[in-house]
Image (cartoon, coloured by chain):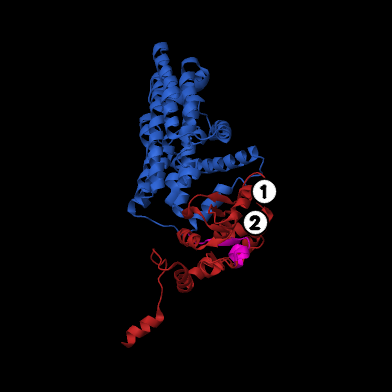
Chain colours: A blue, B red
Amino acid sequence: MKIAQIILSPIIAFVVGMFFLGLARKIIARIHWRYGPPLTQPFIDIIKLFNQTSVSHGGLFNLGIILSLSGSIVLVLFLPIGNFHPLSGSGGMLVILYLMLFGPLGIALSGGEAANPNTSIGISRKLILALGYEAPLLFILLAAMIHNNTISIVEIVRAQQEAGWALLTFPMVVPGIAYLLILPAILGKRPFELVGAAQEISSGPMVEFGGKRLAMVNIQHAFSMFIGIALFVNLFLGGSSNPGFFIIKMLVVFIVEVLINAVFPRMRIEQAFRYLWRWPTLVSFAGLVLVMIMGR
Amino acid sequence: MDRNQLRKWLKEPAKMGHKYSLHAIYFCTGCGIIEVPPSITARWDAERFGIIPVATPRQANLFLITGYVSVKTLKAIIRTYEQMPEPKFTVGFGSCPINGGMYWDSYNTIKHLDKYIPVDGWIAGCMPRPEAIFVAVTHLWTLIDKEMANGYKRYREKYRYYRANQEKVLGKLEWPPLFQIEDKDEQLVKEKS
């Protein structure tokens, strides 16, 4: 049973993440009053990219993408998807915190080997952005851990199934709002889309990737999209008792993110950093203090 | 997606992928680029055919030469074309890349683009309307289906011819040849001596 879950949950994450990428393109097209591509367009792109030639710039260039992709796949195993939680008994949220760094780090290692100036700008932006959102993320996870007196994400989901969604109960609503404020930065969506900005730094860290390497970067993007939303659903929307409801909850959060993405312009990196270390950090710190004062 | 295309997808996924996911490199050579923004935005919406503009040649497989090609631009075009991953498709847009167009007697413009890089198809007109881009795309689909959009193969086979033509215009090129140039005559000379 556990082996079936280990095989199934990355497949679910892959299919759902790619479907989300296609849905985002369709929704943005409808907001622009366009017809938009078919929902299967990301899959078509992946099929095409795997059948192209591609250029390698050295050993680390190949290994970095694999590191990033495998880090994301392992991270999915630690996240409960409904009642699928193959590895989440061990380590809990501390492992998730460590593994969340693998995605950007692998891309950064791989892009650094390519020695393109656009890549280095993109990587520095990515790491600064990660520094920006990880401070509030730490506060949020700490608040969730203290509130439930556990580091296990499965326990947190179980506690919410008894007491109701954490987003609707008083002290936990404050970190929940902080998570909503940093969610576009975690997903790399529009107000914080400065990493892969196609217009200014020619798609940033991805500038030297082509063919099957770009396909792997796209798959990693789908996985990171899945992870960012799944963590929110698990921590604040009460998880779910089966994967179907879990994906529906994720879909709602994702559509809200896409709508924000469709109407906002892009921030500069110093504006993004100033925002991230001011409002979300303040709100999440206030949430942490409230949780500690109010007790469990 | 059409339901009767499903069998084609199962039979030749690679070819169908190349057909329905054309990523065009954003490269502006002349005035023709002014027709591209309306065709990729709300008015004509190229994205429903799977065509999106990308910023780097490594991710692109469709190269639209929009407008006249000056000698300086030719250098950039060749470098961009050689960086694109195979299979790649080139479309000349407007009458200038075909035969020089209104710059037919200019001293600084390339008259026949297909001497320097292989071109899979042409869109005639000065300017062509955005609808012409979509007609060209459907023609390109047919060509990919019949395996006639083989410019990248021609470039590989006849690289010596293209490289010689490029060097005739640009002088000595700063980058090494993309493919091995097999010089049969020189080999014969070496064997004899």
Numbered mark located on residue B133 in the image? 2
Q: Are marks 2 and 1 in contact (CB under 8 Å)?
A: yes
Picture quadrant where residue B140 is located? bottom right
Q: Nearer the viewer, residue A73 or A275?
A: A275
Image spot of residue B177 (x, y percent): 40, 67
Say whether disc 2 or disc 1 marks the residue closer to the N-terminus: 1
In this rendering, would A52 be left or right of B5? left
**x%, y% of residue B120?**
58, 65
Name the residue located 33 percent from the left edge and 85 percent from the top edge.
B191
For this rendering, which residue is in front, A15 or A271? Answer: A271
Q: Is residue B178 magenta?
A: no
Question: Element at badge 2?
Answer: helix
User: In which quarter of the view is residue A6 placed?
Assistant: top left
Mark seen at residue B44: 1
Tell me which chain the residue with mark 1 is part of: B
Helix, strand or loop at label 1? It is loop
Residue at the far left in the pictured view: B193
Residue A70 visible in rendering: no
Residue type marked 1: Trp
Total number of numbered discs in the rendering = 2
Marks 2 and 1, how far apart at CA = 10 Å
Q: Quadrant of the C terminus of chain B?
A: bottom left
Q: Amino acid at mark 2?
A: Ile
- Are dots 2 and 1 on a single chain? yes
Q: Is residue B135 above or below residue A113?
A: below
Please give the chain letter of the residue carrying mark 2.
Answer: B
Say above or below: A123 vs A159. below
Viewer-proximal residue among B64 and A209: B64
**As rendered, which of A26 and A232 lies closer to the eye?**
A26
In the image, residue B141 lies at what x, y percent? 62, 60
